[in-house]
Amino acid sequence: MQNRSPFFSVIVPIFGVEKYLPQCINSILTQTFNDFELILVDDGSKDSCPKICDDFAKNDSRIKVIHKENGGLVSARQAGVEIAKGEYVACIDGDDWISSDYLSLFADAIKATGADVLCSGAVWWTNENDNKTVIFPLESGLYEKEKIKKEIFSWLIEDKNGRYFPNNLWAKVFTLEVYKQQQQLINTFVKIGEDSACVKPCIYRANKLMILPDCNYYYRQIQSSMTKKKKAFDWNGPEIIALHFEQTIPMNEVDFQQQVYRNCVHNLFNVVLSQFYQNKSYKQIRIDMIHEIERPYYKNAIRHAKFSFGTKGWFACMLLRNKFFFLIRILNRFR
């Protein structure tokens, strides 16, 4: 067993993905760049995932397995980074996989640039006949601090047109110091938007950001995934994420406070839209909605959020501001 730290800590949070987990793990173990540790975090999975993790660990000393009570994605990632020893952290979801040169491409870019955050595109995969390559929406190359401020800060959280820096933790690599600090600050209550709560402060703190042109991460789109289940989202989420941004990113730079308000309204609209998945009467749902959006933080965000006229954000804000819940109900039916 080597004494020095590995170059990468690859953290995989795992819950209920027994069908896909072997492909995920095998894709990591067969990397052409092998200076890494693999941390598998079993978040109280009730299927065969715990056994799959243990079986792989018996045959490869690079693997560390954590078995914990179910606490959600944030708590799983926090448990993983707590024991991470690598110089850099790569996050991979347990139902996704990577190409054999994935880590090698990041390692080469790190050695060439010294970047502390690196991003790449991905292939969004549904099945063999339904997948699309999504290139990262920034010109590839190195962004030093002044260039990050100039070209990214204005849309880091959300700009007037609803544009925002990609939220996903996967297909990104961070220095352990930057990632660990930000991941450990996230409230484990957060179930929707947890990636964004980590990524945005990391980008803000990056001194060198590298955008790779490659798309070697395979993001599996599963209809039963958390964000696609027809259920009502929790009312607390948008406020918790907004307050998290206010605590981790200085609001007095550029227009970050306005960006936070826009993002909060965006997230709140999705929560409102989801309420119609409940088995309740429209009258009761409307009563609940009025009560919730009257919270001081939400009232303030709706009042002050400014979107460009005619954009989706402008429309959503207008509907919330005027409490046009019947129109939101119609939108929900046609989603």
Image: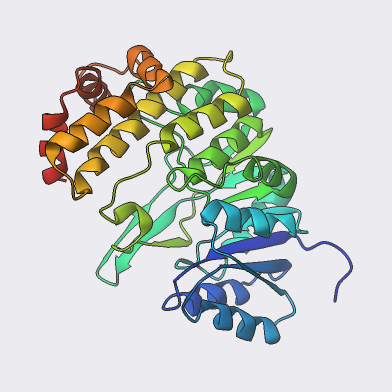
Q: Quadrant of the N terminus?
A: bottom right
Q: Is residue 254 visible?
A: yes
Residue sitting at x 35%, y 60%: 225
Residue 141, given in percent of the width and then of the height, sits at: 56, 40
250 versus 202 height, above or below = above
Residue 171, given in percent of the width and then of the height, sits at: 52, 53
Front residue of 49 and 68: 68
Residue 98, given in percent of the width and then of the height, sits at: 51, 66
Apparent side of residue 3 relative to residue 214 in the rendered image (left or right): right
Q: Is residue 107 visible?
A: no
Residue sitting at x 45%, y 26%: 155
326 versus 24 height, above or below = above
38 versus 196 height, above or below = below
Apparent side of residue 277 relative to residue 72 in the rendered image (left or right): left
Q: Which of the 4 image quarters holds residue 145?
A: top right
Residue sitting at x 19%, y 50%: 279
Residue 218, given in percent of the width and then of the height, sits at: 43, 63
Front residue of 36 and 108: 36
